[in-house]
Image: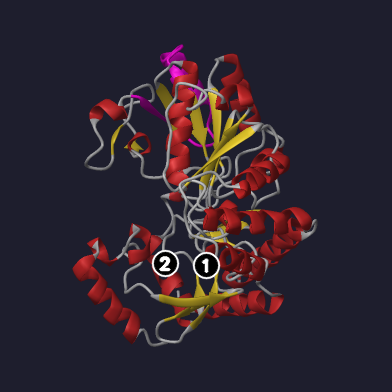
């Protein structure tokens, strides 16, 4: 495939945008080469500025669960845009989508919409701190909750020490209130709680990790985490920005029958437009301004275009009883095909999958946390990525990202992808 126009556009972008991109992973820095500039997308396919067509396994990092340019979403946005794009005033549609989300998700009474997953997680932490009147939080290495200062923390020198900033601009004062645990390791959480008694406001976690590849929780891990939080008067926050409305109507809470205290959403809930949200039982949410003392605001929160897209998407998912089963079956089919293609070519690998999320790791050992995910052969992944790109298959340009399956993918698309993986595997 030729990428001449994309290459020219990247050179132009670098002159006016830092790194040529508005989000770092798009720059292909971890895989090398020039990023692909998208021009359009429809269903399971994305088309670049050079006219190349790719089978898309990123799907805008998750929200295109029913495919690109899903007609009900597009129609809803067009009709709403005709009436005005932003008011800075309440609209009926905000209440409609809130009521539907609360109906679909267990354990929540009220929800507030924001403009991104980062904003949702940042607000959830503030709410947890204000509600509990405690300052510290626990997060897990490898889990990504956006680029808010509290989350850009790396491990300290020992299991009971606080973390340190892993980005310039994050202060040591902020870092001291963020404690870092190990995903799928309950003992690391217990150690932190014991060392910081009555100081921890919340534990925030991706209940299914998606930012170190797809890593499901070990059996019983979330259940025990829930128990620990209850016993220690700590709020449990599920970051379901990726998993919410994707793994089940009610997200991981429904799928694994574990209820969090606060849940954050993004991606799917916006139908492809910039949206985030956080939700909890009324007892907690009523602490938010203007009803309560904890301040949170956003001029464009509840934007009518985003609400129209999100409502159309949630309605479609709520009304289609079989959609999540279809997504799971397609993902299992893909997993079996990838296993066969890589195994027959002598490639060392591990595949993680849950629902419509899947990732391939080039290492034989199980991938259960950030440490094990980091052991993958990144050089092999780079060749794998670019090989698939040449075959017209677009996966995430990073070994630390999950693939997202959309319902628009046909079994012919999956068969082609499996064949392409077999072809690329012969060259690895």
Q: Is residue 186 above or below residue 165?
A: above
Residue 33 position within the rendered picture, expressed as x and y whole percent measured from the top left: 32, 73
Residue pictured at 68% horizontal, 32% vertical: 107
Q: Is residue 205 magenta?
A: no
Between the C-alphas of marks 2 and 1, the distance is 10 Å
Locate the N terminus and report the quarter of the image it occupies: bottom left
Determine which quarter of the picture holds residue 330: bottom right
Q: Position of residue 4 (x, y in %)?
A: 32, 86
Residue 142, visible in the rendered structure = no
Does residue 163 appear in this view? yes
The quadrant of the picture occupied by the C terminus is: bottom left
Q: Which residue is mark 2?
A: 380
Residue at the spot of label 1? 347
**Residue nearest the observer in this picture, 208 or 308:** 308
Q: Give the percent coordinates (x, y) of residue 289.
A: 47, 27
Q: Check the image and report above or below for 4 versus 383.
A: below
Residue 357 in the figure: left or right of residue 150 = right
Badge 2 vs badge 1, beta-carbon distance below 8 Å: yes
Please give the label number shown on residue 259: none
Q: Residue furthest right?
A: 321
Range shown magenta: 177-201
Callout 2 environment at 10 Å: few (<14), some (14 to 19), or many (20+)? some
* 42 horizontally vs 17: left or right: right
Let me know if residue 191 is in the magenta part. yes
Picture quarter containing residue 159?
A: top left
């Amino acid at each position: 495939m030729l990428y001449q126009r994309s290459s020219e556009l990247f050179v132009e972008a670098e002159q006016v945008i830092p790194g040529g991109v508005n989000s770092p992973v798009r720059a292909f820095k971890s895989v090398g080469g020039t990023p692909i500039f998208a021009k359009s997308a429809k269903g399971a396919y994305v088309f670049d500025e050079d006219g190349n067509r790719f089978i898309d396994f990123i799907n805008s990092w998750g929200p295109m669960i029913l495919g690109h340019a899903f007609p009900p979403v597009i129609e809803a946005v067009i009709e709403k845009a005709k009436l005005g794009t932003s008011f800075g005033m309440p609209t009926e549609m905000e209440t409609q989508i809130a009521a539907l989300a609360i109906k679909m998700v267990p354990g929540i009474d009220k929800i507030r919409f924001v403009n991104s997953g980062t904003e949702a997680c940042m607000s959830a932490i503030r709410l947890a701190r204000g509600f509990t009147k405690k300052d510290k939080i626990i997060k897990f290495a490898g889990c990504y909750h956006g680029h808010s200062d509290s989350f850009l923390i790396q491990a300290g020198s020992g299991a009971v020490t606080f973390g340190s900033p892993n980005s310039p601009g994050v202060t040591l004062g902020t870092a001291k209130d963020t404690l870092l645990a190990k995903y799928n390791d309950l003992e690391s959480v217990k150690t932190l709680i014991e060392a910081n008694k009555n100081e921890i406001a919340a534990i925030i976690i991706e209940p299914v990790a998606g930012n170190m590849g797809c890593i499901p929780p070990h059996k019983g891990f979330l259940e025990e985490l829930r128990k620990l939080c209850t016993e220690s008067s700590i709020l449990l926050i599920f970051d379901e920005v990726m998993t919410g409305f994707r793994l089940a109507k009610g997200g991981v809470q429904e799928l694994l029958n574990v209820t969090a205290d606060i849940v954050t959403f993004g991606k799917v809930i916006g139908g492809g437009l910039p949206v985030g949200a956080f939700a909890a039982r009324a007892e907690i949410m009523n602490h938010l301004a203007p009803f309560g003392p904890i301040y949170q605001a956003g001029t464009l929160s509840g934007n009518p275009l985003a609400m129209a897209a999100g409502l159309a998407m949630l309605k479609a998912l709520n009304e289609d009883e079989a959609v999540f089963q279809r997504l799971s079956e397609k993902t299992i089919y893909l997993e079996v095909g990838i296993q066969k293609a890589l195994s027959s070519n002598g490639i060392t690998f591990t595949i993680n999958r849950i629902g419509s999320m899947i990732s391939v790791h080039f290492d034989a050992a199980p991938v259960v946390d950030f440490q094990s995910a980091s052991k993958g052969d990144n050089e092999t992944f780079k060749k794998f990525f670019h090989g698939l790109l040449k075959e017209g298959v677009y996966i995430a340009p990073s070994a630390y990202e999950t693939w997202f399956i959309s319902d628009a993918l046909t079994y012919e698309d999956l068969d082609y992808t499996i064949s392409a993986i077999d072809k690329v595997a012969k060259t690895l």
